[in-house]
Image (cartoon, grey):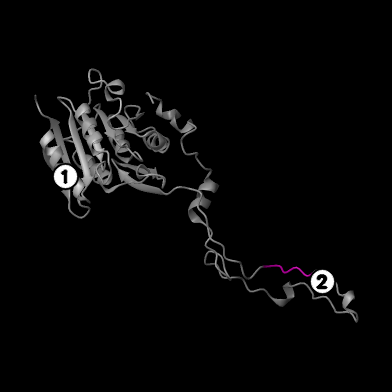
Amino acid sequence: MGSMDAECLECMSCVQPELSAAEEESCWQGDDDIAGHEKGRQPEDVHSSQLPEAPQLGDQQEDIVCDYKPCFNPYKTWAPTFYPCFGKEQFWFAGHQIVVQESIESYGGVIWPGALALCHFLEDNQEEFNLQHKKVLELGSGTGLVAIVACILGAQVIATDLPDILGNLSFNLARNTRGKRLHDPEVRVLSWGQDLEINFPQSSCLYDYIFAADVVYHHAHLDKLMETMKHLCQPGTNLIWSNKFRFSTDYDFSRWFSTTFNTEVLAEFPSSEVKIFNATCKSD
């Protein structure tokens, strides 16, 4: 996907449709009625004078006509509630509220600890890592939280991920940066290790920063990820990798990362087991 006007991203057929206020409220509140009352409201006392008069029985059973309709239903049958909306998370970064829509369909549809840690780091270190007018490419953007924060902080952002992730990514990026950005964000397909020189030629694709948050976990594409990092990280580029360390493969990749690039640890978050590294390419 090439460059696009972020104002129009929400009009794409692949993005999640916006709901009306009433529909959105129903998605979140649900129907938690229980027998005898609704939403904590106690049923009002109904006096006998308010009820319709009961019909009198005749001598023959066939003469009985029962058209009695009660004026209220004191008990409501319970039924499970279904929520047609995806989950939403709300954050406050760079002086703005950010609402991120999640999806349960893939790893890229939820917010991971490394992304949150990187957003906090970027917000708290704006003097040292000034993103205004800087060219930033993010690997594995997922829901787009890091790209959103970078865009609000003034960066010229390219958010990348697999094709099935781009709809929700575009939706979140457009909605949360409108009126807050210096540069229109771009969303592009990037499959690690595939057609790198064709889609991101080194002669023209030069970036100040490469961001990667929680791209390392127990998957079979770590070699392709490393190939992509090496291709994109050129002289003058800072590669900032934030990751929660869960498995032995994470530590193995970290050692590989340190031997491939000049690296330093920028920050550690012991409570969430996240580390943030800054890397630059080694000279030949």
Residue 126, can we see it? Answer: no
- Any mark on residue 252, and which? 1
The image quarter containing residue 278 is top left
| Residue 220 drawn at (x, y percent) | 27, 41
The amino acid type of the residue labelled 1 equals Asp
Between disc 2 and disc 1, the foreground one is 1
Q: Where does the magenta region start and end?
A: 68-72
Q: How many marks?
A: 2
Q: Name the outermost residue toward the front.
A: 220
| Residue 112 drawn at (x, y percent) | 30, 47
| Residue 128 drawn at (x, y percent) | 15, 35
| Magenta-colored segment: predominant secondary structure | loop
Q: Are marks 2 and 1 in contact (CB under 8 Å)?
A: no
Q: Is residue 278 magenta?
A: no
Which residue has dot 2 on it? 66
Q: Secondary structure at mark 1?
A: helix
Q: Residue at x 30, y 41 (%)?
A: 95
Q: Residue at x 46, y 36 (%)?
A: 15
Residue nearer the viewer, 95 or 263: 263
In the rendered structure, the answer to whether residue 120 lies left or right of residue 46 reads left
Which quarter of the image is occupied by the N terminus? Answer: top left
